[in-house]
Image (spheres, grey):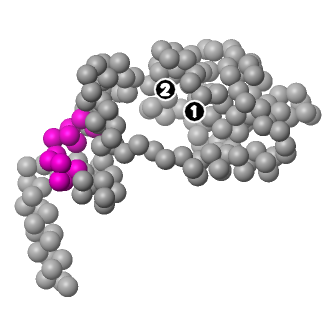
Amino acid sequence: MRLRTADIYGGMIPSRLREDETLPALAQSIARHGLLQPIVVQENPVNGRYMLVCGARRLAACRMLGLEEIDAVNIPGDKPEAVACFLEEHFTRKGVSFLEEARLLSRDGVAQKCCMPEGEMRRRLSMLELDAQTQAVIERGGLSMEQAEWLLLPQAAELVSEQIVKEKSNA
């Protein structure tokens, strides 16, 4: 269904309604490609408006663009049904690793078309400077990008070696 953004209120987690540094990139992507996934709402029969269930950032980006109407899916039921929908949607979401993002960004023409901030793009692409064995260890070990960035430092091998020696002597 199409809804007026003015008729949508609330959200399951109020902190997700605040603007952050990635919201302009999301807005830019929506401006370029359109809203690829509708938001999820639940009609409030008392006031005739719609409570936001899923899609707080998408809604905020659409409002940032000044869109007056957006696509939405209205789920039937009561508020516990809406909360369950929200939790299920977030629980089952699987993110893409930063190394996989880097591999995708390195494909011909992708980085030039991507709305990701330049600094974030550079950070991810720098991870591809690590050898394949180190990348595999990062993915198996579940290291964050912040942790993996240390492995790019020239003195990283020495620091890792020292840590291994320290751990062996404590064992």
Q: Which residues are magenta?
A: 124-135
Asked if residue 131 is among those painted magenta in the image, a careful observer would answer: yes
Residue 56 in the image: x percent, y percent? 62, 34
Contact, CB < 8 Å: mark 1 with mark 2?
Answer: yes
The quarter of the image holding the N terminus is: top right
Residue 41 in the image: x percent, y percent? 74, 34
Question: Residue most toward the right?
Answer: 46
Crowd band around label 1 with a 10 angstrom C-alpha radius: few (<14), some (14–19), many (20+)? some
Q: Is residue 128 above or below residue 37?
A: below
Whichever of labels 1 and 2 marks the residue nearer the N terminus, that label is 2
Residue 88 in the image: x percent, y percent? 65, 50
Q: Is residue 29 above or below residue 103?
A: above
Q: Quadrant of residue 2?
A: top right
Residue 42 seen: yes
Residue 150 seen: no
Q: Which mark is residue 57?
A: 1
Question: Which amino acid, by three-letter code, is at mark 1?
Answer: Arg
Question: Residue placed at 63% from the left, 15% from the top?
Answer: 67
Q: CA distance from mark 1 to mark 2?
A: 8 Å
| Residue 136 shown left or right of residue 114 in the figure | left
Mark 2 — residue?
Answer: 26
Question: Which amino acid, by three-letter code, is at mark 2?
Answer: Leu
Dot 2 falls on a residue whose secondary structure is helix
Asked if residue 164 is among those painted magenta in the image, a careful observer would answer: no
Question: Residue placed at 55% from the left, 17% from the top?
Answer: 34
Crowd band around label 2 with a 10 angstrom C-alpha radius: few (<14), some (14–19), many (20+)? many
Residue 103 in the image: x percent, y percent? 28, 36
Question: Residue placed at 12% from the left, 55% from the top?
Answer: 156
Question: Residue placed at 66% from the left, 30% from the top?
Answer: 39
| Residue 8 shown left or right of residue 169 in the figure | right
Q: Main secondary structure of the magenta part?
A: helix
Q: Which mark is residue 97?
A: none
